[in-house]
Image: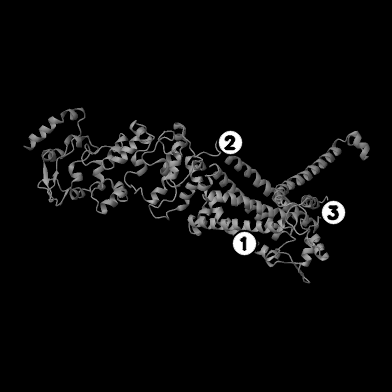
């Protein structure tokens, strides 16, 4: 781990290149995909016209999609290979701590916990986004190929899967876009901690202070000269569990928001209701407990 | 002699005239004195014979018979000797009268000049029709009464097309007197007929078919789906047709329009065993464009059905899943972003 006085290496050249590539392809795919999804709308037709007609828009979308598929394959290969050879550990695979961290963070934000959780190399929000991208990307690639080669695909699968793929591709794309413009833009740019943005994925280096603040566990490890423990001794198929854990986090995190906020609101409502009841018509047991004078005495 | 001829005509057509004597239109009888002669003719420069006979009874029955005298359409021919008409052949002879109708029917004349028939005439194709060729010269009747008359008129030059049409679901119903089905001119128009091979016209065919097939009243009357146009437009073919505009060269195959699957003049009921779109024939129809399509391929198109639990349940299921999943994910994340900001502002 190369360090200097003020900054620490956070991302390899490969990770940085992959990020720029996926970012550019995402923009091209969104710009050429949404006018196709919303083609009856005037703005979509204007965009198609501005890009030189539907044929070119489709060509661009397919070319970018094929590149995206290659990128996904290269990325997954690059992540799986060293892991299979027990040389590295997948630092983005969700662990039990991530699920606990997410709940702890929400409790902290609601004021029921004094301290926020502390994170290692990647926090649960980053892992959520990574797995959303990888799993959503896999859905997009699979359905995209089905839509690109319907003749070849229907030689093997039912014809109904083509319109299924269209519905899935179109909706999954919309969701990916919405997650990026909300979750990613917020966490990487607009949140008070990140504003105006974290440049480490472009430069490869993170300020030492920032690392210590945002990833204290990793900072401590680096200071002690320890690396992440490799998957020594675990079987080869443990790599296959990674996407399952990823999917679990992807489903868990949004639901957690509803559950924790819902529970919080329900508790407050209950508390409000019971204090209101106490004030209006206190029961004998409560009277004794609280020691309040009975309201009905007057 | 003139008088005798007129009397002879009167006698010959007496029966018709006795029922409904037409109001005397001034001067017609004078002209018929000569032009009532079935043998009256001239020889054109080409050696062709051009009859100058006018069927008095047919003219009297025509839409103009009770209103116009001969000179209304043939000004300058009031008195013999008539001006000399120098026409080399029958085509030129016909052409010499082309400007006549617009005196009264200016709007239709203008439309006809936008039509494909005029383009052909202007390009020198003398077979192409103008006013009198479809409507007749002297025996002009209401062109669409009965409506089956329309297809008879077009059949004069387009017999094969009309034969195919008469065997189609539309044509058979038209012959049965059904007022809801399209006759030739309902799709092609009467005067401003466009070249049906033109891209611009082809691209309008979904809207054209949709005029009837998107009408809920007609759909209910005949047990048809009113969603065929909207389901077509929502799918790949319809989207391509909507977005293509008029960019492609005419004739280049670029997407399937209604007529590419259902046929043009020979459209059959979709349940007809010979229909191009019945399940047994569908893959053959797909292969017109999608060479090598397998038996599973046609199911990729939902046959104008909206996905539902019974039709395309898998498509329906995935659609419902995303309808719930997208708000779930985005809502859950936005909630957490809101909490994050709330905490930040409270701490400040």
In this view of the protein, which residue sits in the foreground, B183 or B285?
Answer: B285
Q: Which residue is mark 3?
A: A114
Q: Are marks 2 and 1 on the same chain?
A: no
In this view of the protein, which residue sits in the foreground, B317 or B100?
Answer: B317
Q: Quadrant of residue A123?
A: bottom right
**In the figure, is residue A41 to the left or right of A111?**
left
Image vertical order of residue B183 relative to residue B251, above or below: above
x and y, in percent, of residue A84 in the image: 71, 56
- Give the numbered dot on residue A21: 1
Subunit of label 1: A
x and y, in percent, of residue B153 in the image: 27, 39
Rendered-image quadrant of the N terminus of chain B:
top left
Q: Are marks 3 and 1 on the same chain?
A: yes
Q: Which residue is mark 2?
A: B309
Disc 3 crowd, CA 10 A, few/some/many (<14, 14-19, 20+)? few
The kind of secondary structure element at disc 2 is: loop
Subunit of label 2: B
Rendered-image quadrant of the C terminus of chain B:
bottom right
Instruction: Name the residue rendered at 39%, 51% in the picture.
Output: B199
Is any part of residue A292 visible from this angle? no
Is any part of residue A138 visible from this angle? yes
Estimate the spatial distance between the alpha carbons at disc 3 and disc 2, rounded to whole Å.
50 Å
């Amino acid at each position: 781990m190369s360090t200097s006085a003020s900054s620490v290496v956070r991302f390899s050249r490969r990770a940085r290149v992959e990020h720029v590539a996926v970012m550019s392809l995402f923009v091209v795919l969104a710009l050429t995909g949404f006018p196709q999804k919303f083609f009856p709308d005037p703005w979509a037709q204007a965009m198609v016209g501005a890009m030189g007609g539907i044929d070119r828009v489709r060509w661009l979308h397919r070319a970018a999609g094929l590149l995206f598929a290659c990128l996904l394959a290269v990325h997954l290969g690059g992540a799986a290979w060293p892991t299979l050879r027990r040389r590295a550990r997948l630092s983005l695979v969700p662990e039990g701590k991530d699920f606990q961290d997410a709940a702890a963070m929400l409790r902290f934000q609601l004021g029921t916990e004094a301290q926020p959780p502390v994170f290692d190399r990647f926090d649960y929000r980053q892992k959520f986004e990574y797995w959303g991208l990888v799993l959503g990307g896999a859905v997009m690639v699979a359905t995209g190929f089905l839509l690109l080669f319907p003749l070849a695909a229907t030689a093997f699968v039912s014809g109904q899967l083509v319109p299924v793929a269209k519905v899935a591709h179109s909706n999954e794309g919309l969701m990916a876009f919405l997650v990026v413009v909300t979750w990613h833009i917020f966490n990487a740019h607009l949140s008070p901690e990140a504003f105006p943005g974290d440049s480490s994925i472009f430069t490869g280096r993170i300020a030492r202070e920032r690392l210590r603040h945002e990833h204290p566990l990793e900072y401590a490890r680096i200071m002690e000269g320890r690396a992440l423990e490799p998957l020594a001794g675990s079987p080869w198929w443990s790599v296959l569990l990674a996407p399952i854990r990823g999917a679990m986090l992807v489903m868990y995190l949004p639901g957690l928001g509803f559950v924790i906020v819902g529970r919080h609101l329900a508790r407050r409502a209950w508390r409000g209701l019971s204090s209101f009841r106490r004030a209006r018509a206190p029961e004998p047991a409560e009277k004794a407990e609280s020691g309040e004078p009975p309201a009905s005495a007057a | 002699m003139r008088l005798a001829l007129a009397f002879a005509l009167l006698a010959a057509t007496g029966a018709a005239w006795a029922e409904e004597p037409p109001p005397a239109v001034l001067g017609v009888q004078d002209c018929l004195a000569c032009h009532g002669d079935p043998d009256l003719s001239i020889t054109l420069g080409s050696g062709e014979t051009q009859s100058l006979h006018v069927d008095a009874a047919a003219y009297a029955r025509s839409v103009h018979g009770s209103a116009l005298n001969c000179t209304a359409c043939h000004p300058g021919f009031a008195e013999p000797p008539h001006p000399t008409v120098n026409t080399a052949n029958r085509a030129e002879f016909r052409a010499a009268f082309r400007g006549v109708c617009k005196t009264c029917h200016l709007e239709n004349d203008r439309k006809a000049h936008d039509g494909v028939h005029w383009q052909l005439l202007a390009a020198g194709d003398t077979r192409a029709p103008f006013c009198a060729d479809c409507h007749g010269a002297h025996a002009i009747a209401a062109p669409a009464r009965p409506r089956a008359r329309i297809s008879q008129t077009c059949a004069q030059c387009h017999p094969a097309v009309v034969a195919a049409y008469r065997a189609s679901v539309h044509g058979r119903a038209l012959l049965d007197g059904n007022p809801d089905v399209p006759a030739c001119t309902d799709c092609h128009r009467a005067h401003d007929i466009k070249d049906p091979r033109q891209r611009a016209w082809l691209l309008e065919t979904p809207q054209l078919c949709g005029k009837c097939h998107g009408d809920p009243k007609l759909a209910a009357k005949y047990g048809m789906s009113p969603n065929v146009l909207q389901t077509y437009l929502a799918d790949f073919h319809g989207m391509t047709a909507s977005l293509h505009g008029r960019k492609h060269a005419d004739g280049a195959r670029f997407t399937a329009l209604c007529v590419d699957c259902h046929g043009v003049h020979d459209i059959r009921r979709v349940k007809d065993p010979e229909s191009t779109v019945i399940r047994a024939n569908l893959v053959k129809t797909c292969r017109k464009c999608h060479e090598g399509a397998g038996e599973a391929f046609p199911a990729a198109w939902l046959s104008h059905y909206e996905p539902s639990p019974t039709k395309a349940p898998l498509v329906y299921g995935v659609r419902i899943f995303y309808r719930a999943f997208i708000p779930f994910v985005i809502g859950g994340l936005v909630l957490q972003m809101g909490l994050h900001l709330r905490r930040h502002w409270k701490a400040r």
